[in-house]
Image: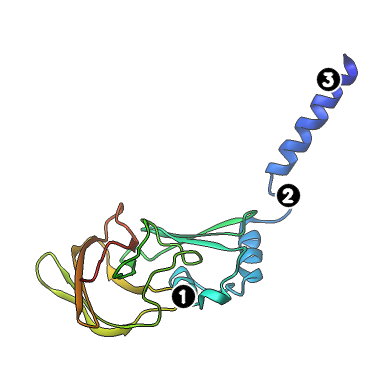
Amino acid sequence: MKKMAVAIALGAALVLAGCTPGDQAPEQEASALLEAHNLDGLQAVEIIDQLDRVAVAERATNLMASVRSDSLLITDGQEEVTLEIPEDRFYVSIAPYVSQTHDCYYHSLTTCVGELSQQEVDLRITDSAGNVLVDETVTTFDNGFVGVWLPRDVSGTIEIGFDGFRGSASFATTDDGATCITTLQLA
């Protein structure tokens, strides 16, 4: 019985030791994860802009990066880093489509793939008061998305034109707003 108690105590000590940060500060751990993927020294905005533009064939298979309304979550399956997005900005990534889409709420910079890769589209975004926030011709990224930074706490409409097709979808840059718009069908 005494041997069993010692074994249980030793096992508990090992489990608890695995949960403590040891000598390494959380900032150092975060830097190690970011450094391993050549993202060290970059802010959330820069990482989002960089990763959304990485060619699909060149994406790291051991990295997950998810854009939330107020932060960027990055993990390699072992470590996780959360970087804050400036409180006056909100990232929306839009994947217009003609025939194929997927469900998405928080944009994954490393796994989301839309239908229209490397296509020139006309993008117009207006807020609910009719103010034009974006009005330009852009090229979708290799992943089929186009990403834009918008002011926080606005709602409105995204309109896209492509090859004679048009479509629209609503958006909201609120705390519970989606960072991934995959409902904009072009017809």
Specify whether residue 158 is in view. Answer: no
Residue contact at pointers 2 and 1, CB within 8 angstroms: no
Number of marks: 3
- Residue 59's quadrant in the figure? bottom right
Residue type pointed to by label 3:
Ala
Q: Residue furthest front?
A: 99
Q: Is residue 133 left or right of residue 96?
A: left
Q: Residue at x 86, y 24 (%)?
A: 6
Q: Residue furthest right?
A: 3
Relative image position of residue 43 (x, y in whole percent):
48, 71
Q: Is residue 55 left or right of residue 76?
A: left
Measure the alpha-carbon separation of dots 1 and 3.
52 Å
Residue identifier under label 3: 5
Foreground disc of the pair 2, 1: 1
Relative image position of residue 71 (x, y in whole percent):
43, 59
Q: Residue at x 51, y 74 (%)?
A: 56
Residue type pointed to by label 2:
Gly
- Which comes before the other along the chain, label 2 or label 1? 2
Q: Quadrant of the C terminus?
A: bottom left
Residue identifier under label 2: 22
Q: Residue at x 9, y 70 (%)?
A: 130
- Residue 96's quadrant in the figure? bottom left
- Which comes before the other along the chain, label 2 or label 3? 3
- Residue 154's quadrant in the figure? bottom left
Q: Residue furthest left?
A: 129
Residue type pointed to by label 1:
Glu
Residue identifier under label 1: 46
Relative image position of residue 16 (x, y in whole percent):
72, 37
Residue contact at pointers 2 and 3, CB within 8 angstroms: no
In front here: 164 or 78? 164
